[in-house]
Amino acid sequence: PICPHCFGRTRVAPSKGPTMASKTKGLNLKHMAGNLDSKDTGAATKDYEDYFKEEDDSKRTGNYADVVNKYYDLATSFYEYGWGESFHFAHRYKWETLRESTVRHEHFLASKLNVKPGDKVLDVGCGVGGPLREIAAFTGASVTGLNNNAFQIKRGEEMNKATGRHDDCDFIKADFMNIPMPDNSYDAVYQIEATCHAPDAVACYGEIFRVLKPGGVFASYEWCLTAKYDPSNSTHRKIRQEILVGNGLPTARTCDDVLAAMKKAGFQILEEIDLVKTADVAWYEPIDKDRSWRPWRDFWSFKTTNWGRAVTHYLVFVLEAVGIAPKGSMGVSGFLKKGADGLVAGGKAGIYTVMYFTAARKPL
């Protein structure tokens, strides 16, 4: 049967356990500097912002590991505050809350992996592990998260224990450009809005191809510039730069670039679609400061409205001024706001998508 909740595709099985998607919580002051010494946060913030002073991507791609690690050390607490445990956007219908759509988005991806209980799955660029816990519960597979940021792994391990997923979910600290696993290690691999941080898409997808077993599926939600992006348009370039600095991205690729890179890495493409085109609710709605707030539907979404963002920003200002929040916290709040505004502008102009979905197979 056709399921209206699964983008018009075949109905998938219900979850084998309670959903793992978290509710958002207050800003965690204890973790605001990530693994950085609080005394070093101001300098780290400045170093990070210096990477984005120019439009030329070469400095960032050449130092991508430092760019991404600094970003997530500085930004993870803000992400948890705004997003909970799943740091990604979601295909959304008008009757869904953001949290409901987040779970469905993860289940849809999991349904494409063709895995069964006991299979080994790799989550590339797993954040603090919200999706991997949900997908492990949904499929019964054992899911390993790959992440090069030690602080996020620490937070993920704490959450695994708190949710009881520590027996079938674990982590590897490693760079996805050099995965420390033998060839043909995993029955399936997926990534959710993570490989946009890669300096070289072909090399990144090539590593994923290498560790995937023959016949296995790699499913992906990728961030991309669309065909509407015009590099000669100064407004478009400004939006692109805001997206890069606010999200720790060394560069930006088009959907065509991503598809070509997957094919060059050796994958057989099974499906590809920009899911933005089939959603009822704009993907950027959760971070659009000018949207209407409906507290009876989703009370905690207030924090990403115009007023909510202002409250958070000035709260951080006060906390930093009195020495509770580490130096540089205002800078982090500032570039995250800039990144959110860039994403909203890119979405409204139709030049950026965060839901370019692909399912690809490693040939037998």
Image (tube, rainbow, N blue to C red):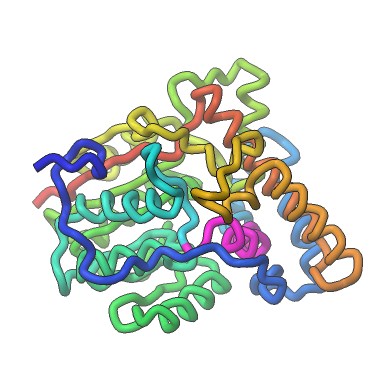
If the image is split into quadrants, where does the N terminus sit?
Answer: top left
Residue visible at 38% across and 49% down in the picture: 101
Across and down, in percent, residue 64 comes to: 57, 53
Viewer can see residue 273? yes
Number of disc labels: 0
Across and down, in percent, residue 69 comes to: 60, 62
Tell me where residue 46 sits by quadrant: bottom right
Viewer can see residue 66? no
Residue visible at 43% across and 21% down in the picture: 227
Q: Nearer the viewer, residue 221 or 207?
A: 221
Residue visible at 26% across and 49% down in the picture: 108
Q: Say if 185 sits above or below 229 in the image.
A: below
Q: Main secondary structure of the magenta part?
A: helix
Q: Say whether residue 120 is left or right of residue 351.
A: left
Across and down, in percent, residue 158 comes to: 49, 80
Across and down, in percent, residue 132 comes to: 35, 65
Q: Say whether residue 134 is left or right of residue 87.
A: left
Q: Say if 268 sits above or below 68 in the image.
A: above
Range of residues picked out in magenta = 69-85
Q: Nearer the viewer, residue 210 or 289?
A: 289
Tell me where residue 72 sits by quadrant: bottom right
Tell me where residue 25 sits by quadrant: bottom right
Residue situated furthest front in the rendering:
296
Q: Say if 134 sits above or below 102 in the image.
A: below
Magenta stretch encompasses residue 190: no
Residue visible at 18% across and 63% down in the picture: 187
Q: Say whether residue 204 is left or right of residue 55.
A: left
Magenta stretch encompasses residue 81: yes
